[in-house]
Amino acid sequence: MTSTSAAAAARATVHGYPRQGQHRELKKAIEGYWKGRVGADALRSTAAELRRGNWQQLAEAGVHEVPTGDFSYYDHVLDTSVMVGAIPARHRAAVAADPLDGYFAMARGTQDVAPLEMTKWFDTNYHYLVPELGPDTVFAADSAKQVAELTEALGLGLTARPVLVGPVTYLLLAKPAPGVAAGFDPLTLLDRLLPVYAEVLADLRAAGADWVQLDEPALVQDRSPAVLNAAARAYRDLGALGDRPRLLVASYFDRLGEALPVLAKAPVDGLALDFTGAAAGNLGDLAAVGGLPGKRLVAGVVNGRNVWINDYEKSLATLGTLLGLAERVDVSSSCSLLHVPLDAAERDIDPQIARWLAFARQKTAEVVTLARGLAQGTGSIAAELAANRADLSSRAGSALTHDPVVRARAAAVTGADGRRSQPYAERAAAQRAHLGLPLLPTTTIGSFPQTAELRTARADLRAGRIDTAGYEERISAEIREVLAFQEKAGIDVLVHGEPERNDMVQYFAEQLTGYLATRHGWVQSYGTRYVRPPILAGDISRPEPMTVRWTTYAQSLTDRPVKGMLTGPVTMLAWSFVRDDQPLGDTARQVALALRDEVNDLEAAGSSVIQVDEPALRETLPLRTSGHAEYLAWATEAFRLTTSGVRPDTQIHTHMCYAEFGDILQAIDDLDADVISLEAARSHMQVAGELATAGYPREVGPGVYDIHAPRVPGVDEATALLRKGLGAIPAERLWVNPDCGLKTRGWPEVRAALENLVAAAREIRGGLPGAAS
């Protein structure tokens, strides 16, 4: 097909769409179901209405082919485990008794049965449920969900394309099930899994699917020849099936690299590639392999994971180059729009600045506009091109994006600014003398339950139903309650509970220059947990202290140390929509300097323990190793720049959760924090062994309470985990704490779990030489 005919064939599509609904209807329905207020039929009805609304919005916007199967009650990887019958043995009875309740048990656990492990979806803040597989795993096809949702879309008269997690990525995301030898490689199950995918594809074909998309984002990472050979075998076998739908293999988040020729040569009918950000290299790579003659290319030129408007002229240039590289070129988002909010109609953002933003609905319109411009020529979108140029120019010239004072301060930073005044060993001795803590000191990560009363108080303040004095009295009362409980429970290092904070990033963003906060910009983090990532639009500074008042108030209520609590610079970037007009390292340095001022003010106000959370350090690691050194250099420098201005006897903590820490052990050491707390309960204390093997010399708090599940761990369970931790970390360097903050949990379970945690610490502490209770 010629370039001209390829352009004429150009159509618009997307990989996926936000699931929650305009008013987070899905979250409310699911949580209502968990609490017994919403029945299963009502939940299914709400979900069906949301799916129908999404598809109709896409179709009315001009999207030719809508995705199906991307909708989920909790997580699309968990949905895939159900689809292929990979149900852990401990959950099979629950799934057999009630598939919906069993599904949620796998996601959240029950009081008696642990959930699946949860970790980050590549380098995003979305969490997926990790499949558990072993040599005895028996797969069995269950395509009911995928077929039902396709049937719903077709019934609306729409052209629909089911979207599935591909078999290679599914296996690469999996881990050995509990009790399986650590050396087991789930990829060895590929030949057992492929017939199940073949059966699902046949079911979808019988239900009316013309195309099916198989997502293989794991192939954008550095992969061994064995993995590439497995991918070639998988798509050779699936491509050779008889009466199958046409297969579109999709990748995103980075360039395919060495996997691109493997997929280009495979007997599939098309590829969907990302051409934004780090994946822009796919353009040259595709030309180098000779393109996709006779195949469809779905070109992801609209960034699906950031919120800035598209540069139409740049995207059209990319699309024009691609026309000669495939039989048919369609226009798409780079990945699922799951990673951005639904609609940029925000009342509280300056209208001019709002024109710089594109959320899911606006990105859909961009895809449609670009497809029309590609198919019909730029004259057909002349007005849109002119408006786009004006908006891009407005952003580039804005005073918000260029503050000379901030830039001068960042440029003046020296290496000495990022180093503590004494080495760790000397600091540790000074801190032990100053703090006087027992062996196995107990603490929490920072937040306590965000009750309905707290959320109501914030809403009442915004609405003017209470004044500032009334609101602050409510916060003061909550802090008093949190402190009193911790003292009674016997916790050693306390927190004030963060009742005044709506979110660990947004709270700070609202007090820093250069950030924009949204009112309705919800994005799924995991399950029914949604966050509103702020938008990092300009240069960053801190006009005044942000946390000192409430931390100081809490410290005045107790003789025990109260941690000052901050979110670190990398997490402030990772959990925001970052600016794309300067290097991330430059932005990180600006944020670090603003936070450095806060750390120093906390110390001056009397804080002896200050925690700077960096849970996103691992998730922001580039997917390809070629980018690791540069990233880790600026990321660790930013943390040290934030924390290095304090005295030796001030103890600096950091916290990380739900990531593969083994990939960044040297970086964890390079942070030079005095104490690090890490998620460890779901991963059975794995990180403690990894740190010990790496020779990590500082204090560690591997979590013994999984706060992402509603179950309360008993004293025996916490004690067993602690003993496992002690097998790797000596008692003088081991802390006892939950996996993460407690804001999503209820007070009854928090009280019970923390009391059990303290009891476990005391039980083991009592048997240690030289221990003091």
Image: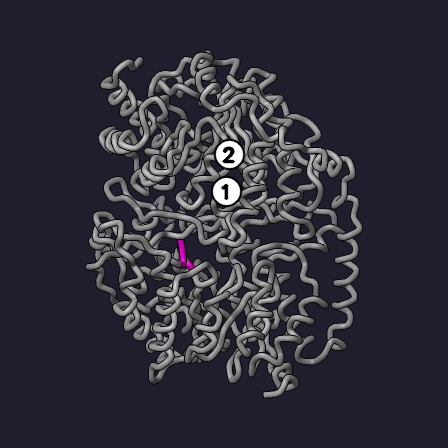
For residue 636, above or below residue 171:
above
Residue at horizontal 59 percent and vertical 49 percent from the top: 521
Which residue is nearer to you in this view: 573 or 39?
573
Residue 658 horizontal/vertical position (percent)? 41, 43
Q: Is residue 470 visible?
A: no
Instruction: Residue 275: say if magenta.
Output: no
356 sits left or right of 771 in the view = right
Q: Which residues are magenta?
A: 72-76
Type of residue at label 1? Leu
Instruction: Give the secondary structure at mark 2.
Output: loop
Quarter where residue 757 is shown? top left
The quadrant of the image that shows the C terminus is top left
Q: SS class of the residue under badge 1?
A: loop
Residue at position x 43%, y 16% in the image: 432
What is the crowding at mark 2: few (fewer than 14 residues within 10 Å), some, or many (at least 20)? many
Q: Quadrant of residue 332?
A: bottom right
Q: Which residue is mark 2?
A: 671
Q: Which residue is mark 1?
A: 617
Mark 2 residue type: Leu
Q: Which mark is residue 269?
A: none
- Asked whether the beta carbons under mark 1 and mark 2 sit within 8 Å of each other, the answer is yes
The residue positioned 38% from the left and 50% from the top of the image is: 38
Q: Is residue 248 visible?
A: yes
Q: Residue 534's image quarter? A: top right
Q: Is residue 401 above or below residue 313?
A: above
